[in-house]
Image: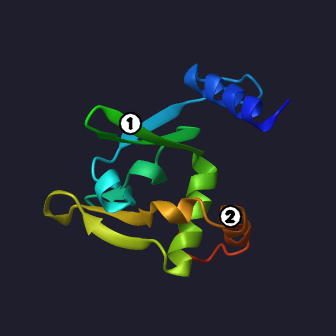
């Protein structure tokens, strides 16, 4: 099977809530309306001092969308992989931990979109070796 066909099959499976083994998966969708303006995504992990967002999700897949004038851009990633990627980007100083939301009641990570697509495999492998860093 060609790479394009493999990718098509993966997308079809996700759209019906299945993984590559045909097992049911839970998908959580987060819309970041500023993503198309800023080139960043904001990933919340704490709200009012309590774990939230990516830190507490029970989803298998995290689907990040940005809607702009009737068009939608989406990024889909497995939650465990996404957590490792964000931890590695924070460690490298590429992603920034920041308070936000109403009255700065949430904490999250600002992640540049380009960083999600640059050397991502190596970052995740390196993150697995460093358990003492900030953990999401």
The numbered dot on residue 85 is none
Q: Which residue is mark 2?
A: 124
Question: Could one spot residue 136 in this view of the protein?
Answer: no
Is residue 69 rendered to the left or right of residue 45?
A: left
Return the x and y of residue 34 as percentages of the image width and height.
28, 53
Crowdedness near tag 1: few (<14), some (14–19) or many (≥20) residues, C-alpha within 10 Å: few
Residue at the spot 53% in from the left edge and 38% down from the top edge? 59
Crowdedness near tag 2: few (<14), some (14–19) or many (≥20) residues, C-alpha within 10 Å: many
Helix, strand or loop at disc 2? helix
Give the distance between the C-alpha atoms of the residues marked 2 and 1, in whole angstroms: 27 Å
Residue at the spot 55% in from the left edge and 78% down from the top edge? 91
- Please tell me in which quadrant of the rendered image residue 70 appears: top left
Return the x and y of residue 109 as percentages of the image width and height.
40, 65
Residue at the spot 73% in from the left edge and 22% down from the top edge? 22
Q: Nearer the viewer, residue 6 or 78?
A: 6
- Please tell me in which quadrant of the rendered image residue 87 appears: bottom right
On screen, 38 above or below 71? below
Return the x and y of residue 126 as percentages of the image width and height.
71, 72
Residue at the far right: name it.
1
Q: Nearer the viewer, residue 51 or 19?
A: 19
Question: Could one spot residue 123 in this view of the protein?
Answer: yes
Residue at the far top: name it.
16
Q: Nearer the viewer, residue 40 or 81?
A: 40
Q: Which residue is mark 1?
A: 72
Is residue 95 rendered to the left or right of residue 12?
A: left
On screen, 97 above or below 105? below
Q: How is the image coloured?
A: rainbow
Q: Nearer the viewer, residue 124 or 1?
A: 1
Residue at the spot 21% in from the left edge and 58% down from the top edge? 101
Among numbered discs 2 and 1, the one appearing first in the sequence: 1
Q: Nearer the viewer, mark 2 or mark 1?
A: 1
Return the x and y of residue 35 as percentages of the image width and height.
34, 53
């Amino acid at each position: 099977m060609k790479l394009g066909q493999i990718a098509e099959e993966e997308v079809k499976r996700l759209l019906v809530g299945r993984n590559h083994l045909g097992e049911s998966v839970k998908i959580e969708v987060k819309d970041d309306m500023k993503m198309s303006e800023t080139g960043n995504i904001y990933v919340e992990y704490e709200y009012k001092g309590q774990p939230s967002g990516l830190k507490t999700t029970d989803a298998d897949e995290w689907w990040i969308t940005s809607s702009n004038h009737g068009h939608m851009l989406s990024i889909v990633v497995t939650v465990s992989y996404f957590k490792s990627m964000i931890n590695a980007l924070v460690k490298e100083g590429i992603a920034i931990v920041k308070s936000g939301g109403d009255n700065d009641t949430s904490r999250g990570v600002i992640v540049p979109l380009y960083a999600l697509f640059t050397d991502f495999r190596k970052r995740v492998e390196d993150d697995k070796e460093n358990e003492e860093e900030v953990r999401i």
